[in-house]
Amino acid sequence: MGYAADHLADAGKCTHPLLEAGPVSVVRRRLRALLESRRVVRLAAWLEALGWRRVGLAVAAVVVLLLFPPAALVQHVYFDRSGLPDLGPFIRFETPMIGQVTDARGNVLIEVALEYRRRVSYDQVPKVLRDAILAAEDKNFLSHSGVDYSVLPRVAHKTAASSLGAWWKGGSGFRLLLPHGGSTLTQQLVRGYFLRDLTRRERSGALVRDGLASRLLSVPLGVSATNMLLRKLEEVRLTLWLEDEMRRRYGSQEQAKREIFARYANFVYLGNGRYGFAAASEYYFGRSLSSYTVADAGEAALLAGISKSPRDYAPRPGDPRPLRRRNQILALMARNGSIPEDVATRAQAEPIRVVARNPVKIQAPAAIGSVLDELARHGEGRFGVEDLFQGRISVRSTVDERVQTIVNEALESGLALYEKRRPRAKGQVQGSVVVLRNSDGAILAEAGGRQVYNARLTRYSDLNRATGSLRQPGSALKPVVYLAAFRMGLDLDTIVPDEPIEVPMGGNRPLKQIANYDGKYKGPMPVRQALAESRNAATVWITREIGPDQVVRTARDVGIRTPLQPDLATALGASEVRLIELADAYRVMACGLLAEPHVIERVTDASGRVLYQAAEAARDVRSTGLGSAELSLIQEGLRGVVRLPGGTAHSLDSRAFGIPVMGKTGTTSGFRDALFVGSTYGPQGITVAVRIGFDDNRKLGANETGSRTALPIFREIMLRIYKDGLVGPAPQFPREIEQGIDEYLVLQAALEAVPGDLTPADGIDN
């Protein structure tokens, strides 16, 4: 039969201690039967006839095929240095940081981030925390070359146990299960920094590396396990390369390890949107890393324990998992000699204490929303909103946090007064406020709504009613009508009729008679009195005389960008505008300077280089064709709204207020919106616009006029801003403006002394 057949036959007859000793198992019986079977003997004879040389070549081919994948992978991991990532950003540590928006004085209004991170150096990580991290994650970090081979037997045992256990319980095909743990700090850093995309794709169901070795491995292991194995091997490859490169760049292994550790301490995710131990310490414990000592080993161990699984180990009072892990780490620290035994014991007995996390109240949410809008407009491909959230840029806004606080409180106070009169509206009525600096249109404060609405704090992504709501301005638009009239030759002493007037409504609809708020007509009166008393009939008559197109043109010249309807109804504020536009129009009328309202003062990059600066120079409104004489007339007319006894804002002409202002009330049809917009004089002054109303456009209620509902908010804002000296002293109006009003008041007093003559109006706003 030949040597092979004889040898196999003899083997079938031989005895062996493993086969004979003890009870004969099923496996041993089957093995003996196999060796003694005639089929085996026949196979041996066939192989001998075929030729052992050919058999050897076939076996060698099979061996090569089996060894090729691991050999290729070993070559790739330890010797292939092609396709490496750019190390520059890692050296510079270009990771997402926290973007800041500050007010005009540098106070932080908001911090935004995709990854909330505080960057710290190696030396800024306290030793007790460094020891806790190494005890929890990588005790041999300072001595290994990036991969800790001493843990491989433990990892191999866990892999075999978990994979075989899953196969035995599942009853399906074998799957390789790679356990968590065993990764060094450098490997974790490489996985999170360089291999994010590969990690995301490994469970996609398709091979992440389409090569012969990958396909061969996927046959016995499956695609998912192959991807995990390939990612792990790539992780090892980049880890070895990174440690070598860092040693070369920094001159020693010690310095390289310090740099790698610092990047890990800043990069690792620790739950609740916090990255790095500095940001996590602030979030969970309300303290900076610089405050840690050995006595804080418990908190250091808590922080160190999070990285294994933030979902499971982020500190929460009453959760046993982070407590258990903290105590394990403390025990390891004591065993390593990092802390004394008594410190570990005392810390293990302490409960978990974290700072209370209240909802973040943003002082100026509407202004922050405007900042994001302006970033999108002004970036021009150089920067944008994403750069702010990545921490690559910072924004200094024009907002003054002190003024913003006043605006917030005044708006809430004014809404509370309204709700006291209308209890059913509690919590539902809304308001908006804008404060502009006259000289350049800078937004000093902006409230797009009440601070709490529908039982939650207002966010910067919510509707900004100051810039995003188109609403009728009502009588607050009348000053534009009068300014247009001044351009056409009228002046403050021109007599206009406050008499019944009918206007066409279009189509086949009948004419509509314009009524005043008080239901009366006072007959002929000077323009200044018609403006001060907000007489509808006189305003419509003026508009008809000069033409609605002149009103639309003038509105555009003073900064109103929303298209207005060129009809008589626009004279009474029927066309919708934004509050910010209305505020800007009054600002222009107060100082004669054109400037785009803006909330960004400048944008800087991480190095402090200025990327954008708001324009400083404003344009003279006379460039639009408006003359100085017309501006003086509208300023005197709006000052008369306050100073004349019949003026709708005459309540501001008191010693208790004492600030010289000009302005105009506004109440829309059916009492749906109440407004007041007013300014102090000239480039050194400010403009404040207030609007109150419901989002669903329901009525505020009878007699809820601009003078009753919105003006008190304006009054409080102006009083507090000037009382606190936040924008300098209140500018005085020119002597000729005040003198013109004085002379008119003297004339009116003289006329009142004559029985039967016309008396000033009652001053009821519409």
Image: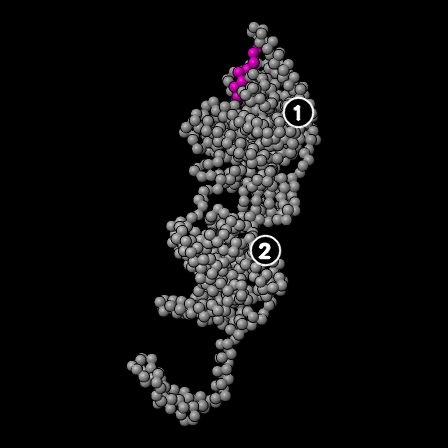
Residue 431 is one of the magenta-drawn residues: no
Element carrying mark 1: helix
Locate residue 747: give its quadrant: top right
**Percent position (x, y) of residue 38?**
36, 88
How many other residues sit within 10 Å of disc 1, few (<14), some (14-19) or many (≥20)? many
* For residue 410, above or below residue 67: above
Depth check: give the residue in front, 87 or 697. Answer: 87
In three-dimensional space, the C-alpha distance between marks 2 and 1, rounded to whole angstroms, equals 57 Å
Q: Sequence order check: which comes first, mark 2 or mark 1?
A: 2
Depth check: give the residue in front, 752 or 99. Answer: 99
Identified at 49% across, 52% down, the residue is 293
How many other residues sit within 10 Å of disc 2, few (<14), some (14-19) or many (≥20)? some
Q: Amino acid at mark 1?
A: Leu
Count of numbered labels shown in the rendering: 2
Identified at 55% across, 28% down, the residue is 720
For the N terminus, the image quarter is: bottom left
Residue 763 is one of the magenta-drawn residues: yes
Identified at 45% across, 67% down, the residue is 155
Element carrying mark 2: loop
Give the magenta part as a residue range: 758-766
Depth check: give the residue in front, 25 or 701. Answer: 25
Identified at 38% across, 50% down, the residue is 318
* For residue 292, above or below residue 632: below
**Percent position (x, y) of residue 757?**
57, 8
**Percent position (x, y) of residue 46?**
43, 89
- Farthest residue in the left direction? 23
Disc number for residue 93: 2
> Dot 1 corresponds to which residue?
631
Q: Is residue 545 visible?
A: no
Q: Nearer the viewer, mark 2 or mark 1?
A: 2
